[in-house]
Image (spheres, helix red, strand yellow):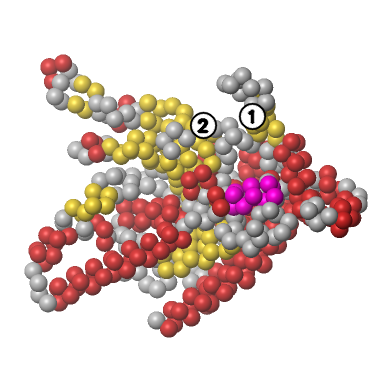
Amino acid sequence: MLTSNDFQRALVFQGGGSLGAYEAGAYKAFYELASERDKIIGREDKPLFDIVAGTSIGAMNASVLVSYVKEKKTWKGSAEWLIKFWEHLATESAVDKMPGFTQWWDYWHSLNDVVATSESARRYYNTKQFIFKGVPNVFKPSETLRDKTFLDPSNVWYQYSNGPLKQSLEKFAKFPIATSYEKKEPRLLLVAVDVQEGSTVVFDSYEKQDGSRKTEYGRYSPEFAHDSNEGFEHIIRYNNGIEVDFVLASGSVPVNYDYTKIMVENYSNEHEIKSENESAKKSKSRESANRKERYFWDGGIIANTPLREAVMEHRRYWHYVRKSEVPLLRAFIINVHPIKQEHLPDNYDRVVDRKNDLTYHDRTLFDERMSLMITDYVNIINKLIKLANDNKIKKSLVDNILQNQALSRNFMTGKHFKYADMIEGMVSVDLVVRIERKNDMNTIANKTFDFSDTTIHQLIKDGYEEALDQGSKIIKQWLSERQKN
């Protein structure tokens, strides 16, 4: 039976290019808030965060963080290490070194307020430099592809190499990354997208039920139910842990980067006929997988805030692997793409910027509300079952109802639930600390490309201050509401 201190914390990092520096600052604040809280409630012997999930640049932050904790066997110093990672990625820009740029631009802005502010112009021309010349420790121009499909000479495709980023990751994280619950190590979850399957793919540092580390996805194969070969259409195996290429897959932004290729076992749904005389007998062996490369893109296309994936994998591990009661989950989310914005976009660049924020912002509020609603329904059902038992209603009558087939299906297998399945192992989320990064009037459309020293250090500072302020308020309000109840 779980106690009040047996909850788990999930830290969720979004994708957002250079805005990942904001996440580093916000994590530092989370570290301080959670550490202080654990001292108060006597929970210092448990991991600070049990799950660290990330998409795109969030996957890179998550990998650096989990690797540090695994290697050092402590969370102390992890915030400073993540900030060092970002200081390594940051670079000097030509504009920041240009004498008199700010004064010159402020002069033109004072004459005509349609002209951008000097800070906005600084960011704008920084990104221009980085887009054309690259960032030494992040990406570099790779090749210019001319798409001849429509015989249009202006149809040019610019691609970058993430080789420098791979080197930076390997400098700050030790791959492969394999962690264990028994060793009190955090669970690393990274999200990418299989381009052809069109679905999220989650790489997991914890072991599965059979003791191996692997990712299973695609169409589930119920025809295997008669033997031990039951499984999914696609399997990626990584028994030694999460590889650096998986992290890069999570951040392979479409168009800007080439696909990341990963070896996958593919199992066709076609059955092999054993013999002409026994055409009615069909069989399929998991041993005859077709192993080949599949292609992956940035997970932010579908799940830029991987809370849903974290919740589903949380249930999967505790219900199916450990076969235990699923611990309560509390989530800490950093939304680097603001949902709300006071000023209306009034030029092309700001319209594109607003469109990008709305495309990639945190859409998990609905998931959070649904999890709370499901928890309420499960609680009501359990109370009704107890009421039936207390009033000596035959257990067989209740069991008959619970064994009926439900309309909903298992997310992983596609098989219909029974009513009994729906009240077993459901995940309860009772607290979400959601930090909202704030845009200022100097925001630009290509802000995710601004890796200049000045911007990166400002993002770290903003992340720390805003997370400390917003996070402490949310936790105080939540504690107050719990005391009332």
421 or 103, nearer to the observer: 103
The one nearer the camera, 79 or 252, is 252
Residue 292 spot, x, y in % from top left: 44, 27
Is residue 201 visible in the rendered image? The answer is yes
User: Which residue is at a point 54% across and 34% down the rendered structure image?
Assistant: 260
Kindly report which numbered mark, 1 or 2, lies closer to the viewer in this rendering: 1
Helix or strand or loop: what does disc 1 sit on?
Answer: strand
Q: Which residue is mark 2?
A: 261
- The residue at 48%/75% (across/down) is 478
Is 183 rendered above or below residue 352? below
- Outermost residue toward the bottom? 484
Residue 294, how many percent across, how many down?
Answer: 46, 31
In magenta stretch: residue 355: yes
User: Which comes before the other along the chain, label 1 or label 2?
Assistant: 1
Q: Is residue 49 left or right of residue 406?
A: right
Kind of residue at badge 1: Trp
Which residue occupies 41% across, 27% down?
A: 291
Q: Position of residue 349 (x, y in %)?
A: 69, 47
Residue corresponding to mark 1: 157
Predominant SS along the magenta part? helix
Amino acid type for the residue under numbered disc 2? Lys
Is disc 1 surrounded by few (<14), some (14 to 19) or many (20+) residues within 10 Å? few
Between the C-alphas of marks 1 and 2, the distance is: 20 Å
Q: Position of residue 433 (x, y in %)?
A: 52, 66
Residue 262 in view, yes or no? no
Relative to 312, is 434 above or below? Answer: below
Magenta-colored span: 347-357
Left or right: 262 as drawn, with respect to 356: left
Left or right: residue 446 versus residue 324 is right
Q: Hey, which residue is sitting farthest top in the picture?
A: 276
Quarter of the image for the C terminus: give it.
Answer: bottom left
